[in-house]
Image: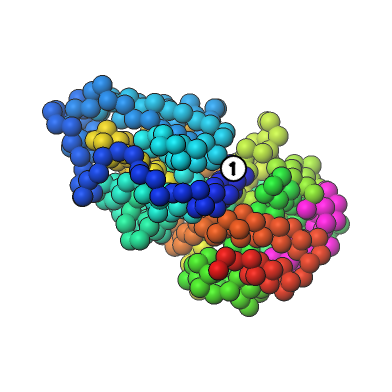
Amino acid sequence: MKTSLSRRLAASVAVLAVTGLGLVGCGSDSSSNDAQSAGGTSPGKGKAECAQLEQFGDLTGKSVSVYTSIVEPEATAQKNSYKVFEDCTGATVKYEGSQEFEAQLQVRAQGGNLPDIAYIPQPGLLKSLVQGGYVKEAPKPVSDNVDKWFGPDWRSYGTVDDKLYAAPLGANVKSFVWYSPKMFKDNGWEVPKTWDDMIALSDKIAATGIKPWCAGIESGEATGWVVTDWLEDALLRDAGPDVYNQWVNHEIPFNDPKVAEALDRVGNILKNDKYVNGGIGDVKSIATTSFQEGGLPITKGKCALHRQASFYAAQWPKGTKVAEDGDVFAFYLPTTNDQFGQPVLGGGEFVAAFSDRPEVQAFQTYLSSDVWANEKAKATPDGGWVSANKGLKIDNLTSPIDKLSAETLQNPDAVFRFDGSDQMPAAVGAGTFWSEMTNWITGESTTDALKKIEASWPS
């Protein structure tokens, strides 16, 4: 799932909120989140990989419809990862991927034609669907799996009013800086361990005549989202996860002094003529350079550092080796202090069910398990996927950047926080936050940019 798509989903929150989410949800009504059973003997009885699915009984002949924005070529790996579920239960999965997912999900909700399950990459949209009465509370086996394999941080993003509705699925890590291992080795540069080390390295690189950083924030209607990630990462490191949560939930003003301090920290890099925009132009060129092209000067030796998420691996030119000893790789964006462990900014999808039939609950349970996480890894030989599931065996991942992402997510010191703008009201997260960060790059002050965003927060 590309972040540009998940960010367009932010607009769905506002639309769903004003178009009547009070329609009757799909599926049967149950007063408990206990697992539903179809009765009979499960086809997979006695097989280790089927153990958790036996409780749902014989589901032969049943089907589960899944709707998602994950399309080919990534869709093939998704469908292949469902084979164990189908063999264990006798049920089949009807998969539908669409690039128009965000718009069509609204249409289906309003028309009473929702699928059994949808993969939703935004907590704000999930909350709107829950509040409209569409989403079924997750059954107990799913809740147990989330507690066992994901923990409280991830659980909270699928929870509304203290009830779990959606288990995490895939994930991405945004707290990365891309670089060229060869370029570093040739110049005797070392991967920085702290933010101060990273600034010292930037000064060293700049002294050679190379602009150390390159960036691009143009993304069509979503232009500016790249800077929102920068700010979120900096705030997590400077002020910690609790302040980050308060900011996201508007318990402190958007222009709180701590937020301004974090944005100025970002400005010391992105608005520094000595640092940017390597191989592209001046500071203002960041606003007109697409996020897909922002890091490409690294491959030509025109730039040394590019902060971007794990999914940026797909943007490198064909034939680029992404590995620790390759053409490009990434390191963890260093911390600014040692107070808050290892903050990790990221995103992911969540499994929302609009029916609680036994076969649907069984599929939810499978997707929230360590069994599925490892089946999905094995079904994705070309890489490009990772999960925060702690039962995922890193050796089953083939891509070095996927392995690094999984190690980062599974690090016991990691403090994960979901992308902030994806949790904010659409008028802010998919509106003024993007536009004002673009204005900020092109000359607006930190004070004015944050003040305008604060003023736009819905009352």
- Label 1 sits on residue: 5
Q: Residue furthest bottom?
A: 257
Which residue is drawn at the image coordinates 58% and 74% (left, top)?
A: 253
Q: How is the image coloured?
A: rainbow
Locate residue 386 relative to residue 144 in the image: left or right: right
Q: Is residue 276 magenta?
A: yes
The segment highlighted magenta reads 266-287
Q: Residue furthest top?
A: 61
Q: Say which element carries label 1.
A: helix
Locate residue 55 relative to residue 320 in the image: left or right: left
Give whichever of 75, 430 is nearer the camera: 430
Residue 448 placed where, x, y %?
74, 71
Quadrant where the image shows the N terminus: top right
For label 1, the crowd category at 10 Å Cα-Cα, with few meaning under 14, some 14 to 19 and many 20 or more, is: some
Which residue is drawn at the image coordinates 54% and 27% (left, top)?
A: 72
Which residue is drawn at the image coordinates 50% and 38% (left, top)?
A: 107
**Image quadrant in which you'd find residue 45:** top left
Residue 47 placed where, x, y %?
21, 30
Q: Residue furthest left?
A: 40
Asked whether residue 131 is in view, the answer is yes
Asked whether residue 179 is in view, the answer is no
Q: How many marks?
A: 1
Quadrant where the image shows the C terminus: bottom right
Give whichever of 272, 350 is nearer the camera: 350
Residue 366 placed where, x, y %?
31, 38
